[in-house]
Image (tube, grey):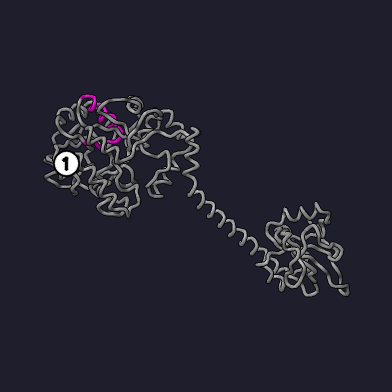
Amino acid sequence: MLYVEPELPVNGEADMNVAVMVGRRNISVLKTLFNKDIKISFFIDNNTQLSKETMEDKKIYSPYTFPRNIVQYIVILVYEYEIICQELIDLGVDANRIICLGNMETDLFEYRNIFNPEVGEQYRLKLKLDYMDRQIKILKENQHYFEQNYIYEAAAILKNKKIRLPQIAGVEETYQKIILDKCSISRYGDGEFEIMLGNKAAYQINNELLARRLRDILISDCHNHIVAIADDYGTMEGLNEKNKNVIRKYMTEEKREEHYALLDMEKIYYNAYISRPYVIYPHDETEKAGKRFADLKKIWDRRKILLVEGDKTRMGVGNDLFTNAETVERVITPNENAFDVYDEIYHAVAAHGEDKVILIALGPTATVLAYDLAKAGYWALDIGHLDLEYEWFLKGKGYSYIPHKYNNEMMGDTIVADISDPFYEESIVETVALTR
């Protein structure tokens, strides 16, 4: 509101009488805020239950009952003054007789015959800081109760079918399905979705055939093959906060609708996070991560395996991820744009993959290859960054640089050191589109 400078008493006139609205916790400011010739006649408080009490030996009135003819001004010393001020005006109080210290437009120097301006500015700042502190406490309290109740609120919304969520099995159910039914698996992450949406992935140039194949496989139904997607659409239960925030930033309403348009919302999908046993979870939960890796190792325990990977991926090199396998062989392909030589890769894997567990780490090409191999009767698993996850787990520091292994997810990690490992070299049964 706009204030007109009041007619202040001049020297020699009687002391000025004011009424004050102030919280009890700030009562001490009155001793230094008002000039010595200002008399506080009474206090005003919206809490009508206080009307029979006193404060500083002065009576407390409600805004409806206070005597108006004995004070020249009503001074409001609370931060949220607007409603109080308007209420007084509605009750017939002249706006020019109301001074709101919390109004930052009020020039306290103009009221220097009433206030000490310096003390007034300090108190006004304190009011603002106290208000902000109260709001922060309210926000924290609201967040606490939200966290207690949101699961029930969400359940009610889901019951009324106001929110759609893809149907995604858990990680444990996914690897049990693979082991018990010897199912092949194709995984979809944000890279595969971006390709399907016509956007460029970091490790594969645009290819319409690849995009079309990915769209078809996403909604396919093959008895010995399952499709897995990242469980990013709901609560993300168990993931660490850093990864949750990354997912939240990516999964906008627009992006969610784009995904939903590609998914079969009636289909049961399996969990693509089967290949992420460590880094997306709290890093101090090492026992849980260790069990997830141990469960995965059961898939190839005492079996012959064929690794299909880029020429700098080097799965199992320098760790014991595959030491429980009966034998390890490899088909080596380009690290990037592997789909450009897809037919050659498929034929090479088919030639060496019979009666083996085929483990593929080849980006979106692995998604398609696992499906095509399953259709041909092979057991093929798209395992993504599983070996890197194992390296990070062994180091115990979350994401970290592994000098001799290619990682397309971290800037600079595509620069890979050379190695000399005769066991690695001896495991290579064929290379595709590479000069070695």
Foreground residue among 48 and 249: 48
Foreground residue among 432 and 5: 5
- In the image, residue 6 sits, relative to residue 321, either above or below, namely below
Total number of numbered discs in the rendering: 1
Residue 49 screen position, x and y as percent = 72, 61
Q: Residue furthest right?
A: 13
Task: Tell me which residue sits at (80%, 57%) in the image.
Answer: 64
State yes or no: residue 142 in magenta. no
> What predominant SS class does the magenta segment belong to?
helix
Foreground residue among 311 and 183: 183
Query: Tag 1's secondary structure?
Result: loop
- In the image, residue 425 sits, relative to residue 214, either above or below, namely below
- In the image, residue 183 sits, relative to residue 134, either above or below, namely above
The quarter of the picture where the C terminus appears is top left
Identify the image quadrant of residue 182: top left
Identify the image quadrant of residue 353: top left
- Local packing at callout 1 (Cα closer than 10 Å; few below 14, some 14-19, many 20+) is some
Q: In the image, what residue type sits under mark 1? A: Asp
Task: Tell me which residue sits at (33%, 39%) in the image.
Answer: 170
Task: Tell me which residue sits at (32%, 50%) in the image.
Answer: 399
Magenta stretch in the rendered image: 359-376
Q: In the drawing, does residue 140 fall left or right of residue 297?
A: right
State yes or no: residue 368 in magenta. yes
Residue 206 screen position, x and y as percent = 35, 30
| Residue position for label 1 | 301
Residue 260 screen position, x and y as percent = 43, 31
Residue 251 visible in the displayed image: yes
Task: Tell me which residue sits at (82%, 58%) in the image.
Answer: 96
